[in-house]
Amino acid sequence: MKFFIDTANLDQIREAQDLGVLDGVTTNPSLMAKEGITGRNNILKHYVDICEIVDGDVSAEVIATDFDGIVKEGEQLADLHEQIVVKVPMIKEGVKAIKYFTDKGIRTNCTLVFSAGQALLAAKAGATYVSPFIGRLDDISTDGLNLIAEIRLIYDNYGFETEILAASVRHTMHVLECAKIGADVMTGPLSSIEGLLKHPLTDIGLEKFLADYKKGN
Ligand code: G3P
């Protein structure tokens, strides 16, 4: 299972990278705005900065919603760095653009996916990743993890190579449940990764080992 971090914050990306378990980064326009990154040139530079910190894939989202605009923007993003994956929304023009990018060998992440039908369409268009937003489904009393399970079943039925990127992960249990279901990737905040570290018996056990060592030395 790959671990991506869902942020545009360079310090958090560095921290996750230093932990040694980071496989990539996802961003979106809201995450960019949260870091105060505005203006096309600054945004493009920020994507390159992120690519220079991590070894893996970095999703960069298009703003255009028409086919020609998505293609133009996506090609510009893909040209920025070999690690860039073009993030395209699950809309009709987006599906057409994903197929176009697939045929040109440009990797894509189909975002804003909330149903198994949308995920099937993304895979048919050849998306590299599909991003079902599990936290946002949970927010409206719909089981986000069940969507991951449905997509896993459909993709396995037909051998689709599109990777299931569980997005809008909010906490460590989302990560664990996605791992049990077989999501290929999860993207979440640093806290969702660091939460995996925690167990009180680890802390108690370490404290006792160190205390016992001190007694004899
Ligand atoms: O990757 C999608 C993600 O950024 C959405 O997360 O927490 O805003 O629902 P959230």
Image (tube, grey):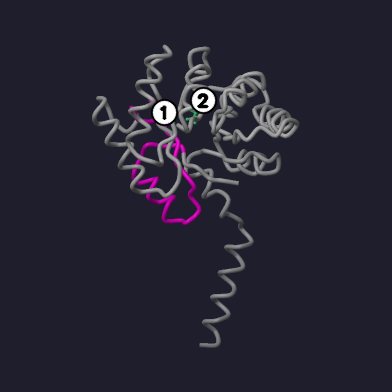
Give residue 28's mark.
1
Q: Tell me which corner region of the image, top left, top right, bottom left or bottom right, holds residue 148.
A: top right
Q: Amino acid at mark 1?
A: Asn
- In terms of secondary structure, where does tag 1 sit? loop
Q: Is residue 191 above or below residue 71?
A: below
Q: Residue at x 52, y 14 (%)?
A: 91
Whole-percent x, y for residue 107 in the image: 48, 33
Give residue 105's mark.
none
Front-lying residue, 135 or 203: 135
Whole-percent x, y for residue 144 in the image: 64, 28
Q: Label 1 neighbourhood size at 10 Å, few (<14), some (14-19), many (20+)?
A: some
Whole-percent x, y for residue 99 in the image: 52, 22
Tags 2 and 1 touching, CB below 8 Å: yes
Q: Residue at x 54, y 75 (%)?
A: 210
Q: Amino acid at mark 2?
A: Thr
Q: Name the residue at the bottom extreme.
A: 217
Q: Is residue 11 within the magenta segment?
A: yes
Front-lying residue, 71 or 86: 71
**In the image, the residue with mark 2 has its CB under 8 Å from the nearest atom of ligand 1:** yes
Residue under label 2, please give it. 111
Specify start and end residues of the magenta stretch as a single range: 6-33
Q: CA distance from mark 2 to mark 1?
A: 9 Å
**In the image, the residue with mark 1 has its CB under 8 Å from the nearest atom of ligand 1:** yes
In this rendering, position of residue 64 left or right of residue 179: left
In this rendering, position of residue 94 left or right of residue 72: right
Q: Residue at x 41, y 41 (%)?
A: 83
Whole-percent x, y for residue 130 in the image: 57, 29
- In terms of secondary structure, where does tag 2 sit? strand
